[in-house]
Image (tube, coloured by chain):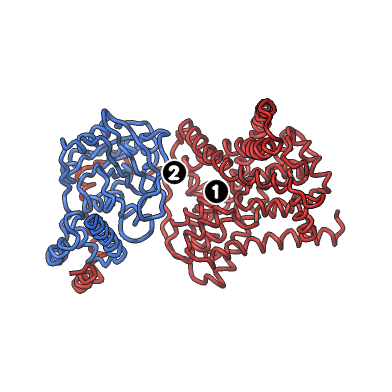
Chain colours: A blue, B red
Amino acid sequence: MRNEFRIALAGNPNTGKSTLFNALTGLRQHTGNWAGKTVSLAQGSVTFKDKTFHLIDLPGTYSLFSNSTDEEVARNYIVFEKPDVTLVVLDATSLERNFNLALQVLEMTKNVVVCINLIDIAEQQGIHINERILTNRLGVPVIKISARNKKGFPMLLDTIDRIVSGVIDCNPVQLKYPAEIEEKINKIEPKVREVVGDQISSRWVSLRLLDGDEILLNEIDKRLKQEGGKNEHSRTL
Amino acid sequence: MSIHELYEEAQGLSTTKLRDDIVEHLYSRSHKLCKDGITYTKSKRDARTEKLDAIFTSPIFGFPIMIVMLGVLFYLTIAGANIPSSMLAEFFGFIEGYITTLFTFLHAPDWIHGVLVLGLYRGTTWVISVMLPPMAIFFPTFALLENYGYLPRVAFNMDRLFKRVGAHGKQSLTMAMGFGCNAAAVISTRIIESPRERMLAILTNNFVPCNGRWGTLIVLASLFMAANFTGGLKSLVTTGVIVGIVLFGIIVTFFVSWALSKTALKGIPTHYTLELPPYRKPKIFDTVIRSSVTKSWSVLVRAVKVAAPAAILTWVFANIYIGDTSFLMYAVEFLDPFGKLLGLDGYIMMAFILGLPANEIVLPILLMGYLSTGSLTEVDSLVDLKQIFLDHGWTWLTALNMMLFSLLHYPCGTTLLNIFKETKSKKWTFLAFLIPTVIAILVPLVITQTVKMLGIL
């Protein structure tokens, strides 16, 4: 059985994402230069029970559209590099704004943990969060932590552990869009699936195509060609 | 069906309103989630943050506070670095004795000892003992300010100025990064979306001194600018000079940004939202340990990787003789008239040219040239160091010019390489080299000629 897993950290700027990353990885971190792009992402690892989790600190972003290089880097990693689990770090004191990103991640990938950070500060400010209701509504585990004080880490690591070993099955709820948009998605999704296969969520790609995200389209095109090239290459061997 | 045909079809179905609808839907969904899962028992306002922001981002106090903070940061660095620096130098000197003994014991030829010990070992350890202590103080202190939430306020304050010169407010953040390392800061300009404004940030980043130049600035300032003061006052005057140099660099940044945005990079700055996070009490121990260990480690690695080959090269140049003049001296004599014009000399010009791979090695190379002993000489006290400079006709003007040249001259090799990687343009990379170089020549030239004309010296 596999015992090394890749965990990507996504989140808005200033949510304490890097604090969490540093607290979990300690000084066992380095900067990795990964496939395709010359962007360096901090990487580090944490051992839990018999497993090693390799954490990848994605750039902090407010959304995952093709607005900036940072957003593209974060999005491409989640969609194309396919981490085993994506951890979305939210700021407990400004959840309304932060949920946006979590919802976008849930549209893109299945294994997600929503990690509500700065919970101690939120409690001080009289913000009480019912993580069970949120877990229910989102279909993925919602965990409250305080990265600064290393609170909630055992629960967080245990949840990741149970997701990768298949004990917890994530069923992220898909946003239902207004009927007009849903109709268009339905029209185009089967064709999208034919082209991209099962590797990427065809519903999400359909949405992005309708949205006119040409940058993503070129990225998919590039990746598909690479894959095709690889396959041909292996056939000739 | 190809993916591009698919895109065409999707575009046929799409409406201009669609992105808005999608985003709006995301927001309403977020709102509903919060309504269901969160209860509030107190008012959400963070009074403390608001009060602090009223001071730190005030139009009146904002800038003075920033300058004071900068001053405190430099003061701590300068005052705190001296003792560990000389301790390290002594320690390396102590080790060197043993290494030399070992070489003698092994009957190693003189040239091997020259290259490895006098060139490589001394060059590298000099860089470590001069650079490491200031870095080990500067980085953690800077990181604490960042951790506390002050840096975004700096960006907020600077934003107005950057807008006025046609640049992007986020440039203040990439500039702050440049204080650590210009090469890294060039990559960090990716946070600026507009290509025009990003180019401005890339081209002007070099005007803030990186950690490779702090050593030069601090050493020269304390030797020549605060010569008549002692103790705490000395560090204070040195700090003042360094703050002045840094502010001058920032002014040049604004000027160049303004000039470029009126000419080659015309345009109106784009708007963006800058989020000011609440002030948070930094985790002092974690921050200090992490930033000193990881950052200082990377400085060490860099010192070994870049300074070591350069030290060897310089040693070889200084020891290859054509007739009775060394290769190094030919170059120095060639560059001397030009250097003199700028209030510098041939040795200094040579040091800057050989220092292209990394700014850290300019001062060691300069010393090596001056001593003409063919290798770096141990300089345990700063008084010895000053005497060497004085013997070569230095005055406060020479020191000032060298500091300014160091501040303004072309970016180091790594930075240039990163600029090329980021812009993918030879033209812009060349401009990134040319603009600072021209300014670095003009400023000392004007100062020197003015001082000569007024007869102050």
Does A223 sit above or below residue B111? Answer: below
Residue B151 x, y percent position in the rendering: 50, 47
Task: Give A76 or B120, whichever is nearer the viewer.
Answer: B120
- Location of the N terminus of chain B by quadrant is bottom left
Q: Which residue shows up at 33% across the image and 40% down it?
A: A55
Q: Is residue A135 left or right of residue A121?
A: left
The tag on residue A133 is: none
Q: Which residue shows up at 76% across the image and 54% down it?
A: B332
Q: Which residue shows up at 35% across the image and 31% down it?
A: A150
Q: Name the outermost residue toward the right.
A: B455
Q: Is residue B239 left or right of residue A75?
A: right
Query: Do the residues under discs 2 and 1 have CB atoms within 8 angstroms?
Result: no
Residue B369 x, y percent position in the rendering: 75, 46
Mark in front: 2 vs 1? 1
- Sequence order check: which comes first, mark 2 or mark 1? 2
Residue A88 x, y percent position in the rendering: 29, 45
Q: How many marks?
A: 2
Dot 2: chain letter = B
Q: Which residue is mark 1?
A: B181
**The quarter of the displayed image where residue A229 is located:** bottom left
Question: Callout 1: few (<14), some (14-19), or many (20+) C-alpha neighbours within 10 Å?
Answer: many
Does B243 sit above or below residue B166? Answer: above
The tag on residue B49 is: 2
Task: Give B152 or B366, whichever is nearer the viewer.
Answer: B366
Give the SS element for disc 2.
helix
Whether residue B159 is visible to the viewer of this picture, yes or no, is yes
Q: Is residue A117 left or right of residue B160?
A: left
Residue kind at label 2, given as amino acid type: Thr
Task: Give B281 or B370, whichever is nearer the viewer.
Answer: B370
Residue kind at label 1, given as amino acid type: Cys
Dot 1: chain letter = B
